[in-house]
């Protein structure tokens, strides 16, 4: 009988990240300056990002070296384990083989530390000792606080007000690692004060928090900004997940028919899937790639492929992506990390070109799947990651129906040990589904920026 845990040694941590831009048939349209609506240059970004990350953002080199100091910190949890979910297979009575790559093993509890560490590192290399960022549910704020802690830097986190109040444990964890956390909107920024004046009781939003974090990074010489998903360099750092997964699949003597990940801004999905996109585009591999999003925030499946802002204030460059509109306020589903109006332009282009598939599912079915997975495999999954579990189960059941074998690989992007209030709501029958009504979507898409 083959193994349950497929492990690599520390020596096998990849030495390079993979850059999908080297292989894409069509590159995304370039980011535009929010004021002039012309393509931005490196100088436009240098107020808030270090030059090395700006270079990675536009690079078309296929392989980018991982610095030794970053690999040294990666050793704290990488290579992450891959599991064969034998007990889940048995519970489903399926001939399919189910593998998952587990990123909840990281000190941050999610994949986000994979990019937080190199982002902090490149900033420090260029003399920046203070980073500002936003966080919704809190996972990115934790990851960046930890990375800054490892590298002796300061971290300022704008946490969406409603999460700040509802998720005190995440805030405590950021503070434990030295991050300073403010509820957003805050009185520390001009945009925050404006938002508070408009509505003193606002629950806040990711778009507002990004505006605040960018504002202080743009104003202060000593502070840069860091983003936890969406941008090209972030996606590239996450490919370490898929590069390891490919080695582990090879060790298991297998290759996936389908690779699945949940999708908020696209980083964990792209991280596991893009190294397989390489196989597909350069080697004609027959692998399917499936990004799964919440029906309450269905960016890839129902958004418009167009230019839009990354934030609410319109301070960020315009990105060409699938979008629900920068002012879209998703309902308060329990997968806080999947409530973003846009997605990575690289991922969106690949979906648009038919190389990657997308689907949207309801949260009650996601929690059903999470429960079955927890009871079979013993891991409490993050609600975000459970979107991938639900779809992996659906694939396994389809294989059973068809009476055929199928090899399924999914990304388990994080654990759900700080998500007990969500599980409690589920167990008490208090979860609702919020499929996005057509009129709300149409309304939100009316306000997309006008780009010639
Ligand atoms: C943030 C987060 C996500 C969503 O972000 P992506 O960039 O789409 O990966 C998914 N899972 C977990 C556990 C997260 O923390």
Image (spheres, rainbow, N blue to C red):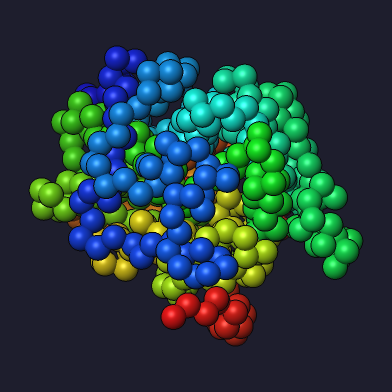
Q: Up-down: is 164 above or below 442? A: above
Q: Is residue 208 visible?
A: yes
In this view, the residue farthest toward the front is 43
Q: Is residue 400 visible?
A: no
Q: Position of residue 9 (x, y in %)?
A: 31, 15
Q: Image point 47% across, 19% down: which residue?
A: 73
Q: Image point 76% across, 37% down: which residue?
A: 181
Q: Position of residue 372 (x, y in %)?
A: 49, 44
Determine whether, in the image, residue 62 is placed left or right of residue 226: left
Number of numbered discs overlaid on the protein picture: 0
Q: Image point 29% across, 25% down: which residue?
A: 15
Determine whether, in the image, residue 117 is placed left or right of residue 177: left
Q: Quadrant of the C terminus?
A: bottom left
Q: Nearer the viewer, residue 142 or 227?
A: 227
Q: Position of residue 350 (x, y in %)?
A: 30, 61
In this view, the residue farthest toward the left is 283
Q: Image point 62% across, 70% down: which residue?
A: 328
Q: Quadrant of the N terminus?
A: top left
Q: Nearer the viewer, residue 25 or 358?
A: 25
Q: Position of residue 65 (x, y in %)?
A: 30, 29
Q: Nearer the viewer, residue 349 or 173?
A: 349
């Amino acid at each position: 009988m083959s193994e349950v845990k497929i492990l690599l040694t520390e020596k096998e941590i990849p030495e390079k990240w993979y850059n999908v831009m080297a292989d894409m048939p069509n590159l995304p349209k370039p980011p535009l300056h929010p004021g002039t609506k012309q393509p931005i240059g490196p100088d436009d970004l240098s107020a808030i990002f270090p030059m090395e990350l700006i270079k990675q953002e536009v690079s078309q080199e296929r392989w980018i070296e991982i610095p030794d100091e970053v690999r040294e910190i990666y050793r704290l949890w990488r290579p992450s384990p891959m599991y064969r979910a034998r007990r889940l297979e048995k519970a489903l009575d399926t001939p399919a083989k189910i593998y998952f790559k587990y990123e909840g093993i990281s000190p941050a509890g999610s994949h986000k530390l994979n990019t937080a560490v190199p982002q902090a590192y490149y900033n420090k290399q260029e003399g920046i000792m203070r980073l500002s960022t936003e966080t919704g549910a809190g996972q990115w704020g934790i990851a960046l606080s930890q990375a800054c802690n490892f590298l002796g830097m300061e971290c300022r986190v704008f946490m969406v007000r409603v999460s700040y109040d509802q998720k005190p444990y995440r805030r405590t964890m950021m503070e434990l690692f030295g991050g300073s956390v403010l509820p957003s909107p805050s009185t520390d920024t001009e945009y925050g004060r404006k938002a508070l004046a408009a509505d003193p009781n606002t629950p806040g939003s990711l778009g507002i928090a990004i505006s605040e974090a960018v504002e202080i990074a743009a104003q202060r010489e000593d502070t840069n900004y860091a983003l936890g998903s969406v941008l090209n360099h972030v996606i590239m750092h996450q490919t370490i997940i898929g590069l390891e997964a490919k080695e582990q699949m090879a060790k298991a003597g297998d290759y996936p028919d389908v690779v699945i990940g949940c999708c908020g801004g696209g980083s964990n999905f792209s991280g596991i899937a893009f190294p397989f996109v390489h196989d597909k585009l350069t080697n004609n591999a027959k692998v399917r790639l499936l990004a799964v999003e919440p029906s309450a925030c269905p960016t890839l499946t129902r958004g418009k492929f167009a230019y839009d802002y990354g934030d609410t204030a319109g301070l960020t460059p315009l990105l060409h992506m699938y979008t629900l509109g920068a002012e879209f306020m998703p309902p308060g589903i329990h997968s806080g990390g999947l409530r973003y109006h846009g997605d990575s332009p690289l991922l969106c282009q690949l979906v648009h070109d038919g190389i990657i598939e997308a689907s949207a599912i309801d949260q009650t079915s996601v929690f059903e799947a999470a429960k079955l997975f927890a009871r079979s495999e013993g891991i409490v999954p993050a609600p975000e990651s459970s979107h991938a579990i639900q779809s992996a189960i659906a694939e396994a059941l389809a294989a059973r129906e068809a009476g055929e074998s199928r090899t399924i690989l999914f990304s388990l992007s994080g654990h759900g040990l700080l998500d007990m209030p969500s599980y409690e709501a589920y167990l008490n029958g208090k979860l609702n589904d919020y499929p996005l009504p057509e009129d709300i979507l149409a309304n939100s898409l009316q306000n997309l920026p006008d780009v010639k």
